[in-house]
């Protein structure tokens, strides 16, 4: 999300502010005197109220302006200019960088007008920013951002043009509001795993903001997270990675998983960097099925010579014949491999043997030790070990995989045992008295 959008929303709250408050004593037009669709001019009848409002609007110091507007709203709680005054407070508190007061003024605005577009956009934006910052309430904040965004998209359809705005100004404002609403709705839909809604809303955001890496990345996730993933996500993650190189390893991994190899990835990165949007008919050839890949792996080498990651792939591929061939070759036979510690006790270790599970900190090996470890030598999570054991059972259900090894040993990587302290030179042990 771009901060400039919120600055635009808040700055626009001052457009024609003084023009909206008609001079004291000016009468409102009689019913029927305005053209259809026109708004009647807001009129402050009380000269004292009018002067207080104009003075607050005209104040140049932000702190003084906020105090004067707060005083005005407290003195005239039922003012015809209450909604306008609160919108001015939003801009003023933004100038003061007072997030708490910005949010408070926006919430007060919704009490006056539940369909106030500025307040809905601002609160939706702030809730979404809070969610992206993380923390225990992140999921709730993002859900609320989506709800506010949905309200905004509904309200904007019938919102009247504010007095004092030109058509161009109003269209610009509505476009800015809409991008914020769509971003919140799309991001919340992604969290809720409503992938079609996330794709629809985030794609419109990216069309409006083609250089916003955050939105491009979220759009990529909306296509890549479903199972099976949608090929469009490969273009969008490549485009995000072209602007944010730290995303390149993830983009390449997703491409390789989908395509079955990295051939063509560099060309995709170059094309995504220069293309303003996804080309019509974009596609990437999908990899062979898992069952076919499992069969191909066994054509290239004996089962017992494959890596642990390849065993895992074959045993979860759904290719029954290939799985039985691998299991017959390795069951009950001692093997050695490298793995990372996920959890550890003296009697057994939970380990990650494949690179994907190492990165996800997800155990895929249970090593039952032949002999308990000394307490001081139990390894810490993340430690890299060389282990040996005999495969005894495995469990493969969906994304869950666990291969149990018995007669386990750790050949390398355990903490060193504490050295035995020797008596100081010149000292002698004496027998205990009888």
Image (cartoon, rainbow, N blue to C red):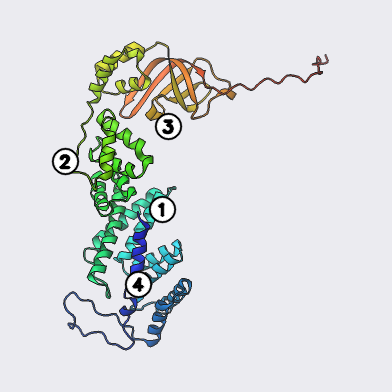
Could you say which quadrant of the image residue 80 lies in? bottom left
Residue under numbered circle 1? 130
Determine contact: label 3, label 4, CB under 8 Å. Answer: no
Residue at the spot 20% in from the left edge and 76% down from the top edge: 38
Mark toward the viewer: 4 or 2: 2
Tell me if residue 102 comes above or below residue 336 in the rendering.
below
Mark earlier in primary sequence (1, 3): 1
Label 3 sits on residue = 361
Q: Position of residue 122 (x, y in %)?
A: 35, 61
Q: Are marks 3 and 2 in contact (CB under 8 Å)?
A: no
87 or 398, nearer to the observer:
87
- Real-space Cα separation, disc 4 to disc 1, in angstroms: 26 Å
State the residue at coordinates (17%, 79%). 35
Label 1 sits on a secondary structure element that is helix
Indicate which label's residue lies in the foreground, 2 or 1.
2
Which numbered marker is on residue 340?
none
Which residue is farthest right? 433
First of labels 4, 2 by sequence position: 4
Q: Which residue is mark 4?
A: 14
Q: Are marks 4 and 2 in contact (CB under 8 Å)?
A: no
Q: CA distance from mark 1 to mark 3?
A: 26 Å
Other residues around mark 4 within 10 Å, as few (<14) / some (14–19) / many (≥20): some
Q: Quadrant of the N terminus?
A: bottom left
Instruction: Report crowding for label 3: few under 14, some 14 to 19, many 20 or more residues within 10 A (C-alpha).
Output: some
Identify the residue at the far bottom of this view.
25
Q: Is residue 283 above or below residue 297?
A: below
Tell me how far mark 3 sits from mark 2, CA to CA.
37 Å
Residue 73 x %, y %: 41, 76
- Label 2 sits on residue: 281
């Amino acid at each position: 999300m771009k901060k400039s959008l919120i600055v635009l929303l808040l700055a626009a709250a001052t457009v024609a502010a003084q023009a909206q408050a008609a001079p004291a004593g000016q009468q409102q037009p009689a019913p029927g005197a305005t053209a259809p669709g026109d708004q009647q001019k807001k009129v402050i009848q009380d000269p004292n109220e009018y002067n207080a409002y104009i003075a607050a609007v005209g104040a140049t110091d932000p702190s003084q302006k906020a105090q004067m507007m707060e005083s005005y709203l407290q003195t005239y709680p039922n003012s015809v200019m209450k909604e306008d005054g609160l919108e001015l407070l939003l801009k003023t508190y933004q100038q003061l960088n007072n997030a708490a007061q910005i949010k408070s003024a926006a919430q007060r605005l919704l009490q006056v007008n539940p369909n106030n577009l500025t307040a809905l956009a601002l609160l939706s934006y702030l809730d979404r920013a809070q969610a992206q910052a993380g923390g225990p309430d992140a999921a709730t904040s993002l859900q609320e951002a989506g709800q506010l965004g949905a309200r905004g998209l509904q309200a904007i359809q019938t919102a009247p043009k504010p007095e004092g705005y030109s058509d161009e100004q109003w269209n610009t404002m509505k476009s800015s509001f809409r991008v914020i609403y769509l971003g919140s709705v799309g991001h919340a839909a992604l969290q809720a795993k409503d992938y079609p809604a996330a794709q629809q809303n985030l794609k419109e955001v990216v069309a409006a903001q083609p250089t916003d890496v955050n939105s491009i990345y979220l759009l990529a996730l909306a296509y890549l997270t479903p199972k099976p993933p949608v090929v469009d996500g490969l273009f969008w993650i490549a485009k995000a990675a072209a602007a944010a190189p730290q995303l390149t390893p993830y983009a390449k991994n997703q491409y390789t998983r989908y395509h079955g190899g990295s051939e063509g990835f560099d060309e995709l990165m170059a094309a995504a960097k220069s293309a303003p949007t996804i080309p019509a008919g974009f596609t990437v050839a999908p990899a062979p099925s898992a069952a076919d890949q499992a069969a191909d792996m066994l054509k290239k080498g004996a089962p017992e010579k494959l890596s642990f990651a390849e065993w895992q792939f074959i045993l979860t591929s759904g290719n029954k014949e290939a799985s039985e061939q691998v299991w017959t070759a390795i069951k009950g036979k001692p093997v050695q491999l490298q793995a990372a510690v996920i959890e550890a006790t003296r009697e057994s270790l939970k380990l990650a043997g494949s690179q994907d599970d190492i990165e996800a900190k997800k155990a895929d090996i249970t090593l039952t030790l032949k002999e308990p470890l000394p307490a001081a030598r139990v390894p810490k999570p993340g430690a890299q070990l060389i282990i040996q054991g005999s495969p005894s059972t495995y469990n493969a259900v969906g994304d869950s995989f666990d291969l149990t090894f018995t007669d386990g040993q750790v050949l390398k990587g355990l903490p060193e045992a504490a050295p035995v302290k020797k008596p100081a030179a010149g000292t002698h042990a004496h027998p205990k008295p009888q």
